[in-house]
Amino acid sequence: MDRKVRFYHVSVDGISNTLWTFSQIFLLIWTPLIVDSATHWVLEDGMIKSQVDTWYNIYDPSDLMLFIQQTETADELKALEKQEDLKFHTSFLTADAIQKNQEKIAFHSDPDCQIARKKLSQFDLYLSSFLRLDAKGIIIEQYLNHKRPIPTKVNQPFCTSEFLFSMKSYDHLKGVSERKFLPNKSEDGLVNPIPQVKNLTEFGQRVYWALQKNETSWILLNFAAIYWRVAGNSFEAIECLRRALDVSPRIHKDLALVSLANILHQSKYSLDAAILMHSALEITNDYDIIYFTLGNIYGALGQYDLADICYKYVYELQPDFEAARLRMHAARCEHKMNLILNKDQNIFNKNNEDEKKEDEELSIRKQIIEEHKKEIEEEIGYPLNKYNIYNALELPENERGQI
């Protein structure tokens, strides 16, 4: 009886010891599979932090050869990236240097450039212009009351007569339709052709009185537009010109067309301004003013060949007009320079095609290195990768019974 009891007691202890040993071995084996570890640590913001997404992550930190191979691979990848960045930067600098050098050579060797001494784009292409009132038989003093004293509280000549959309007023142009959003800029250069606006407050008050008597006078509406152009209010000036275009006789519409074109050109709606100027050319006799302004508009648009034609026509009309002569040569200069630069750019683009082949080879080398890196990781890898993580309780057949 005693023997049976003692035998039963020993058997229980043996089973317990066996189970405890197996559980310890199991934990030692499978703990690394469920722990997210890192092999690359850096000092950041005063703290040591792990780097998960890094070239230096390795499956087996104790494998010296694997570590050395991955370090060499990472260094080579960095070197290739630097080479690509340097190549792109050098290519960009080379193109810029070639362009500047060719531009300098063309400028100093071209006779038109030497006469103008600068490119057309360096001229002021936003000069204000206005048609001659005396050419139309308009004398400002005949339409404004200069005897009436100016009151302490003055008024401004707003054009507020009822007026809807009209094709006559070019409301279909983008610049006109967006007149509420145009920038305001004072065209004080109009003081020269129209000296009456030197005292702008007095001029505005007298135009206001005249409009009170006849708000549909095309002449007074043009006067009001002059006031607003000098005052620097694009919206109010266009409101007056829209009404002026609607009521002006055809032979006098050029007056409002030129004013409207100037406002749109000043507001960088130069294409709309060109359309208005061409409409004015069908009517006007002031060809020199319109062609000079049209040359400035085409210059701002970068159409230097068309600008040259306009300035040339003005210079032929007025050989003593030095501004037109200089701008004519400047337009020719910049047009020829652009042709040369475009030709050189085409040659440069062709050379870049050859460089693309080198870039492709560089990309292939980088891809090979990346693939080589993956192969190293897969072949050497982490020793426990040979266990199936999706069936973690089952050991490989050739390793069963080794515990």
Image: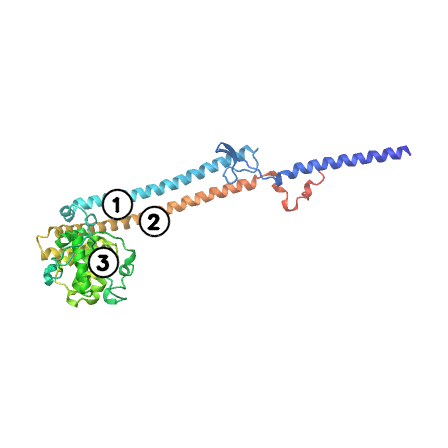
Mark 1 or mark 2: name the one nearer the start of the chain: 1
Q: Is residue 403 visible?
A: no
Q: Which mark is drawn over residue 237?
A: 3
Identity, as a three-letter code, of the amino acid under mark 3 = Ala
Kind of residue indicated by mark 2: Glu
Alpha carbon of mark 1 to alpha carbon of mark 2: how far? 18 Å
Residue wearing tag 1: 99
Residue 235 location, x and y as percent?
A: 26, 57
Residue 64, numbered circle: none
Mark 2 — residue?
353
Callout 3: helix, strand or loop? helix
Q: Residue at x 31, y 47 (%)?
A: 351
Residue 183, given in percent of the width and then of the height, sits at: 27, 53
> x, y percentage for residue 247?
20, 67
The image quarter containing residue 277 is bottom left
- Does residue 136 appear to the left or right of 98 in the view shown? left
* Quadrant containing the N terminus in the rendered view: top right
Q: Is residue 96 above or below residue 318?
A: above
Which mark is first along the chain, 3 or 2?
3
- Viewer can see residue 366: yes
